[in-house]
Image: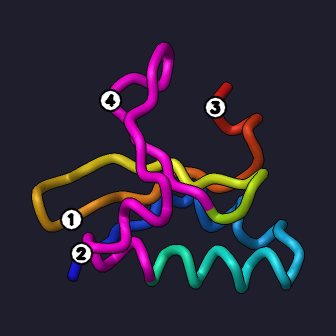
């Protein structure tokens, strides 16, 4: 089970989400904690200005951006639509 850290920006963005999307995001985070579900979430490495960061899906339009802190720990940095990649 992964240990998670949360960036302050992640919490600010999360608070702005509509309730149904918050629920989906929490389910995705719970799945993310168990590495065997990473394939289902579409975990992938980002490129360009986001190099060194990773992302996984909440739904078709929304993503969570994170970094690996260590082998068993990740920090969630941002949540939102594809605009968070900019």
Relative horizontal placement of residue 77, taking residue 71 as reference (left or right): right
Q: Quadrant of residue 12?
A: bottom right
Circle 1: element type: strand
**In the rendered image of this protein, does residue 49 appear above or below residue 75?**
above
Residue 63, percent across and down? 63, 53
Q: Residues within 10 Å of mark 1 (few under 14, many from 20)?
A: some
- Residue name at image x 83 percent, y 66 percent: 16
Q: Nearer the viewer, residue 16 or 54?
A: 54
Q: Are marks 2 and 1 in contact (CB under 8 Å)?
A: yes
Residue 14, x across and y down, in percent: 70, 68
Secondary structure state at the residue bearing disc 2: loop
Give whichever of discs 2 and 4 has the lower sequence position. 2
Give the image quarter of residue 64.
Answer: bottom right
Relative placement, left or right, of 8 versus 74 is right
Whether residue 62 is situated above or below residue 28 in the rendered picture:
above
Residues shaded magenta: 31-57
| Gap between marks 1 and 3 measured at Cα | 22 Å
Question: Which quadrant does the C terminus fall into?
Answer: top right
Q: Residue furthest left?
A: 71
Numbered tag placed on residue 85 in the rendering: 3
Rounded to the nearest angstrom, the CA distance separating label 2 from label 3 is 24 Å
**Residue 82 horizontal side relative to residue 29, left or right:** right
Q: Which mark is residue 2?
A: 2
> Colour mode?
rainbow
In the image shown, does 80 or 43 lie closer to the viewer? 43
Mark 2 or mark 1, earlier in chain:
2
Q: CA gap, disc 4 to disc 1?
A: 15 Å
Of the numbered discs in the image, which one, if any, rests on residue 52?
A: 4
Q: Nearer the viewer, residue 70 or 15?
A: 70
Which residue corresponds to mark 1?
73
């Amino acid at each position: 089970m992964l240990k998670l850290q949360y960036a302050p920006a992640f919490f600010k963005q999360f608070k702005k989400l509509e309730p149904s999307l918050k629920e989906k995001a929490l389910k995705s985070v719970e799945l993310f904690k168990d590495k065997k579900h990473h394939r289902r979430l579409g975990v992938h490495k980002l490129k360009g200005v986001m190099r060194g960061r990773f992302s996984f899906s909440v739904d078709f339009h929304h993503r969570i951006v994170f970094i690996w802190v260590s082998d068993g720990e990740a920090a969630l940095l941002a949540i939102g639509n594809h605009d968070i990649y900019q």
